[in-house]
Image (cartoon, helix red, strand yellow):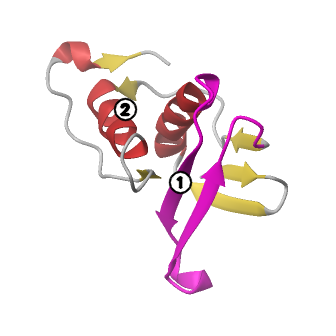
Amino acid sequence: MGKFLFEQQLRVDFDDRLLAHLERVITAKLRRGESFTFTWKDDASIGDGRTTIWLHPRSVIIFKFHGSRRPLLNKAWLEALSYTANGPNGLYVVPEPPPQTSGTEILS
């Protein structure tokens, strides 16, 4: 499990593979100077609700991975996550779609 740390106030566990995809989508938007919301479902241990944060180019974000290897990224998943991030509800986690062809997986 990797960790997403936001503004030194919030720490959330995400699977390393998911975290790598989120990192790519979030950093791409922030590099373009875009602000957006990011919402996820909370773990049952903290109430089973949901959390939404506002991300902006000056946000302090740390992506802390448990493993040292960079996972292969699924282009279809990156596109699906980017699609949500660009919509009115902001970024939220969607299930990983199967790769469409052998060329859809790229090295991170």
Name above or below for residue 73 compared with residue 86: above
Name above or below for residue 44 compared with residue 73: below
Which residue is painted at 42% across and 24% down in the image? 72
Amino acid type of the residue tagged 1 in the rendering: Phe
Name above or below for residue 108 compared with residue 24: above
43 is within the stretch colored magenta: yes
Pointer 1: what residue?
A: 38
Which residue is painted at 54% across and 26% down in the image? 28
**Left or right relative to 11: residue 20:** left
Specify the segment rendered in magenta.
Answer: 30-59
Who is closer to the viewer here, 30 or 19? 30
Few, some or many residues within 10 Å of mark 2 (<14, 14–19, 20+): some
Which residue is painted at 74% across and 52% down in the image? 6
x and y percent of residue 61 in the render?
A: 74, 43
Amino acid type of the residue tagged 2 in the rendering: Leu
x and y percent of residue 66 in the render?
A: 66, 43
Pointer 2: what residue?
A: 78
Local secondary structure at mark 1 = strand
Q: How many marks?
A: 2
Mark 1 → mark 2, Cα distance in angstroms:
15 Å
**Which residue is farthest left?**
101
